[in-house]
Image: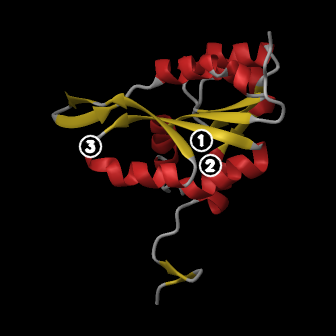
Amino acid sequence: MENTQKGVNNAFIDSQNLNLGIRSKGWELDFKKFRIYLNDKYHVKRAFLFLGYIERNRKMYSYLKKVGYILVFKSAVRYKKDGKYKIKGNVDVELVMTAMIEIHNFSKAVIVSGDVDFYFLVKYLYKKNKLEALLVPNKRYSTLYKDFLRYILRLETLREVLEKQRGKINGRSKP
């Protein structure tokens, strides 16, 4: 029996794909502005943010909760590549499973990632008339999403609205 809450939209956000995609364009996302944008544009009541847990980032996690995200953690894995240590928190399964578990608790879903690993989720949500939008960080997203072009918004086009402002006092630049 379908128990979907009318007008309640959820966002499912792959934080690593979002962060790396935005940073590759030379700017940093303001997560508070992004949360407001999701609510204002897509009526997102619950925004699930999937990320790898790193102990030293506890302060940031507190901030993200404070501005309205529901954090879903996966243990981060440290590995060596090209002589450098990197940290990865692959959250694909957690994002898909959470969306499927929650499917009767939202009207529409906003997926935030350009990662091809979410293709079947996007396709399923579309077939069930539950896809509101597919927000991709930049123009580099999977070509498999070509069937969903009308749902795609490249966040790089919203840089002026969503960019984290550094060094500003009362809305103006520091002298």
Point out the tag, 2 or 3, that comes first from the N-terminus.
3
Q: Using the image, tell me which numbered label, if any, was put on residue 127.
A: none
Going from N to C along the chain, the mark reached first, 3 or 1, is: 3
Query: Residue 25, how many percent across, how many down?
Result: 51, 50
> Mark 1 sits on what residue?
138
Q: Position of 84 compared to 157: left or right?
A: left
The reply to whether callout 3 and callout 1 are in contact (CB within 8 Å) is: no
Picture residue at 48% right of the left edge, 50% below the top: 64
In the image, what residue type sits under mark 3? Glu
Tell me: 80 left or right of 162.
left
Give the amino acid at mark 1: Asn
Query: Three-letter amino acid code at disc 2?
Result: Glu
* Percent x, y of residue 136: 62, 37
In this rendering, the label closer to the viewer, 3 or 1: 3
- Tags 1 and 2 touching, CB below 8 Å: yes
Q: Name the image quarter holding residue 144.
A: top right
- For image coordinates 57% across by 60% down, the residue present is 163
Q: Mark 3 and mark 1: span between their CA atoms?
A: 29 Å
Residue neighbourhood size for the residue with mark 1, other residues' Cα within 10 Å, grouped as few (<14), some (14–19), many (≥20)? many
Q: Is residue 130 left or right of residue 174?
A: right
Q: Position of residue 154 (x, y in %)?
A: 67, 42
The part of the image, by quadrant, that contains residue 112 is: top right
Distance of mark 2 from mark 3, alpha carbons? 30 Å
Mark with earlier residue (1, 2): 1
The quarter in which the N terminus is drawn is top right
The residue mark sitting in front, 2 or 3, is 3
User: Disc 2 on helix, strand or loop?
Assistant: helix
Residue 34 visible within the image: yes
Instruction: List the residue tagged with mark 2.
Output: 156
The residue where tag 3 is placed is: 55
> As rendered, which of 123 and 12 lies closer to the eye?
12
